[in-house]
Image (cartoon, helix red, strand yellow):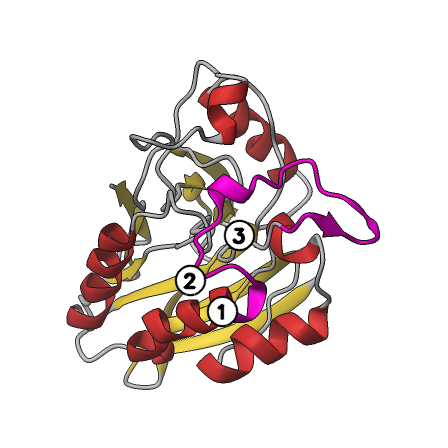
Amino acid sequence: MELRCIAFNLKNKTDHFMLEPHGDHQIGSPLVDFNKIEERINAIKNEKNRYTILMGDMCDNINAYAGGAVDKRYDPNLVDKELNNFERQSAKLVELYKPVKDKILGALAGNHEWKSIDKDRFITNICKPLEIPYLGFECMLHLGFYYKKTMIRAFEVWACHGSYAGMRPGGGINRLQDLAGRYDADIFLHAHTHDKAFYTDAQVHHIVKTNELGYRPKVYVMTGTFQRPHLKGYDSYIERAPKPRISKVGTITLHIDPLNGKIHIHE
């Protein structure tokens, strides 16, 4: 597991912070919605307190053979001929995100990347060009918010690319809540499912200093995708075994209010 402590110095005590995770681009597939990617990157670029974390499966990286075996997911008709290998796909990712590299908290590896590349290659092709930390398969990020060198509040984030193949979006949230029992965090981020979904909860705790009850926010988020589930003229692998849930292109934003300890979520 990778760990990071990140400090944010607020200009005003009432400043808010926005975290917009980006994942499951699968650059290299013709189903990628580049207009949506560029729209969301521009939002990060144009809003001073909006940041992102790359959630894995940024590159499609599906080849006829992977790890010495046939990759059954490979379909030559579902390969962007201009972005047909990991080098080209990762270069495109870097090109897209370079304008906001200072606002990326790090990059997780997903199953599409780890199918045929190792940690060193991931770091060389993605993390080093963007000058961002490698966050492994799962990570914990301590976000500390300071005003005039005094900490207002801190939030702990647990994030992973993950795995889940259930039929219903609610099942993904249920699984994330089950995983959350292992970790002490406020925000739990999970990619992979191509769903945009979230659930908010709270945890009661004892404020010893005042001998009062407090409520600590707990937020569970499935972070969406930039890959369209259907595209005219293409037989996608999703269509081979249709499921009740459909991929939701786009992102979810966590709107964090450090002063009041609140987290609001919206698409």
The location of residue 226, given as percent across then percent down, is 36, 46
Q: Are marks 2 and 1 in contact (CB under 8 Å)?
A: yes
Residue drawn at x 63%, y 37% is: 73
Residue 174 position by quadrant: top right
Gap in angstroms between the C-alphas marked 2 and 3: 13 Å
Three-letter amino acid code at the position of disc 1: Arg
Does any portion of residue 199 appear in the rendered image?
A: no
Q: Residue 60 carries which label?
A: 3
Q: Which of marks 2 and 1 is in front?
A: 2
- Residue 158 lies left or right of residue 93; in this view the side is right
The location of residue 6, given as percent across then percent down, is 47, 75
The relative height of residue 39 versus residue 262 in the rendered view (above or below) is below
- Which region of the structure is painted magenta? 63-88
Gap in angstroms between the C-alphas marked 2 and 1: 8 Å
Residue drawn at x 48%, y 83% is: 129
- Residue 28 lies left or right of residue 135; in this view the side is left
Screen quadrant of the C terminus:
top left
Screen quadrant of the N terminus:
bottom right
Gap in angstroms between the C-alphas marked 3 and 1: 11 Å
Q: Which residue carries the number 1 mark?
A: 88
Q: Which residue carries the number 2 mark?
A: 82
